[in-house]
Amino acid sequence: ARGRSEAARKKSARDLELLSFAHKLKHAGFWEKAMQLVETLWSAKFEMDPALLTVAIETCEKEWQQALLLLSEALRRGQGAERDSYQAVIRACRQSQVWAWPLWLLREMRLGGPSPGTDLSTEVLDTLAESAPWEQTIGLFASLGELGPSSVADARRGAAIRGCSRVGELLQALVVFERMKVPQPRTCAAMIEAYGLAG
């Protein structure tokens, strides 16, 4: 028992040292070195702290493909990933205006990963409503299904309506609006805006 305790203590100290180094790479913006660090640890079959993976992914915030690659490889290796790792990839994709992957990651989190929660789901949907083509926003219904609690489903519908109203797609906005039981004020304002744009 004493030997196991000492080994655990050394591992904890090593994890903290590696995490500190990963944070330094992040602050310096050295995403390639962060990837190399993770790949080296994987090659050595090192049991990695999930927080270290998250920091490495965050370092790739302007390189969405590399961020996605790190997360995908971690899952392929059966390592698993914490919610923050998914969130970091989603934000990297959003920065590059890549919309399909955030939707897919939300769905994967619902199916077997850490719960995205209302805040992350709504964050992605709001970004879609503001920036993505309205067809992709409407596509949420087909690609995601229900996101869980009714509050999240309403947020999803509200995002779809705002996405449609932004480009004057009144009919599509109306179809979604009619599915809402108790529309939020923000959603009602979006419908009024859609009517205004339609003239």
Image: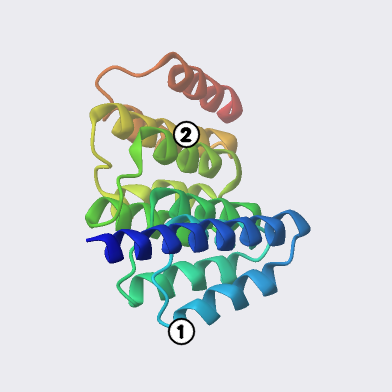
The scheme the figure's colours follow is rainbow
For the point 50% across and 17% down, the residue is 189
Q: Quick one: label 1, few (<14), some, or many (20+) residues within 10 Å?
A: few
Mark yes or no: residue 49 visible: no
For the point 34% across and 34% down, the residue is 176
Label 1: which residue? 44
Instruction: State the residue in front, 16 or 48.
Output: 16
Figure check: 135 above or below 130: below
Q: Nearer the viewer, mark 1 or mark 2?
A: 1
Across and down, in percent, residue 39 comes to 53, 79
Left or right of 28 on screen, residue 150: left
For the point 44% across and 63% down, the residue is 10
Label 2: which residue? 170
Left or right of 193 on screen, residue 176: left
Q: Earlier in the sequence, mark 1 or mark 2?
A: 1
Figure check: 92 above or below 38: above
In terms of image quadrants, where is residue 160?
top left
Across and down, in percent, residue 107 comes to 31, 54
In the picture as drawn, the residue positioned furthest to the top comes out as 185
Instruction: State the residue in front, 156 or 139.
Output: 156
Figure check: 199 above or below 100: above
Instruction: State the residue in front, 118 or 7.
Output: 7
Tell me the distance, in whole angstroms, between the alpha carbons under discs 1 and 2.
56 Å
In the picture as drawn, the residue positioned furthest to the bottom comes out as 43
In the picture as drawn, the residue positioned furthest to the front comes out as 2
The amino acid type, in three-letter code, at marker 1 is Ala
The amino acid type, in three-letter code, at marker 2 is Leu
Q: Secondary structure at mark 2?
A: helix
Across and down, in percent, residue 98 comes to 57, 60
Mark yes or no: residue 25 visible: yes
Q: Secondary structure at mark 1?
A: loop
